[in-house]
Structure formats: C-alpha cells, structure tokens
Image (spheres, helix red, strand yellow):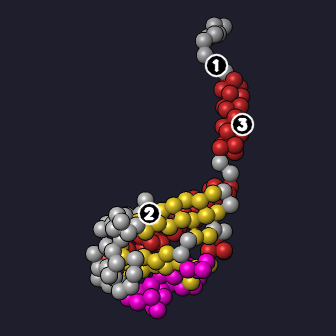
Amino acid sequence: MYRNKHGFTLIEIIATLVIMSIVAAGVLYKAMNTDQIDLMAQVAKIRNQVRYAQAMAMKRSEVWGMACFGGMCKLFKDIPLNPVQLPGEKADTISLADLGVSMNSWGVFFNKLGVPYKSYPPSQPVTLDNKLEITISGNSGSVTLSITPETGLIQ
C-alpha cells in the first residue's frame, strides 16, 4: 500500500491547536485584567448615556442634558429639575458607586441642534477655551472623555 509521507496527521494538527490555545490564553490573561475591562465598560456606558441626551435633544427639538455631582448622575429634559430615566436603568438617578467608578462633577446640556453647553439655560457653549472634560476613575486607572465644541462629539 502506498503512503503519502507529505503533510500532517489529524493528531498533530489537534495537538498544535491545543498548545496554541493555551499560549494565547496566557498572553491575554497577562495583557488585560478584569479591572481594566470593567472600567472600559463603564466609560462606554457613560459615553453612550451622554450621546443619548444629545440624540433626544435633536430628535425632539428640546433642551436635554446630563449632569453628575457628588457621585450621582441624572439625565434631564427641558430643565435640570425634570429628571428622566435613562434606558436600561431602574431609576432616574445613577449611583457611580454602584458602577464601581468615580467622576469629577460636570454637566452638559444640548440644544435642539445638538450643540453642547455647560450651563442651563444654554448660554455658555462648550468652546476650545471653555472645554468640557469628564474624568472617570476606577481601580485600574482613569480615563478622560472630552466633549468637542459645536458637534458634541465625545472623544
């Protein structure tokens, strides 16, 4: 019987894949810990909540905003005394301690065009000289988000 001596057997291929999987798992474990993953997840959540406020302002042609003071965050419609529940949240106030992060105090309001303002009523726009930065801190460090003038893009 003729045997082809070129190529690999199925056992050799499986053994190679198992070894590569073990090495890859070790590298990923060393590269990123759960604290960093948790912090990045909360940063993404807060970024999306601010984007939601801007989208609602443009969609409904109303002033919407979000503010965080003393470890609590709220979404506002029209005036700061009119809190609205964020999608996916159980109450209209979000506790940062429950999220495992802390933040500097900040507030942003969006007019019907989605332009960001630092005060209510919208009279003090976010400018290059008057920046709005949100610093989010967790166990593994901190991340700073910037809201750009005119567009409200969150970087």
* Residue nearest the observer in this picture, 113 or 142: 142
Determine the image quadrant of residue 30: top right
Instruction: Give the image location of residue 24, x and y in percent.
Output: 66, 37
> Contact (CB < 8 A) between labels 1 and 3?
no
* Magenta span of residues: 69-92
Residue 120's place in the image compared with 48, above or below, is: below
Mark closer to the chain start, 1 or 2: 1
Q: Provide the residue designation for mark 3.
A: 22
Mark 2 residue crowding within 10 angstroms, few (<14) / some (14–19) / many (20+): some
Instruction: Give the image location of residue 122, x and y in percent.
Output: 33, 82
Label 2 to label 3: alpha-carbon separation: 39 Å
* Residue nearest the observer in this picture, 27 or 105: 105
| Residue 115 visible in the current orientation | yes
Mark closer to the chain start, 2 or 3: 3
Amino acid type, label 2:
Ser
Q: Residue 98 vs residue 103: left or right?
A: right
Indicate yes or no whether the magenta region holds residue 71: yes
Q: Provide the residue designation for mark 1.
A: 8
Amino acid type, label 3:
Ile
Q: Which mark is residue 78?
A: none
Label 1 to label 2: alpha-carbon separation: 54 Å
Instruction: Give the image location of residue 73, x and y in percent.
Output: 54, 79
Q: Secondary structure at mark 2?
A: strand
Q: Secondary structure at mark 1?
A: loop
Residue at 66% over, 74% down: 97
> Contact (CB < 8 A) between labels 1 and 2?
no
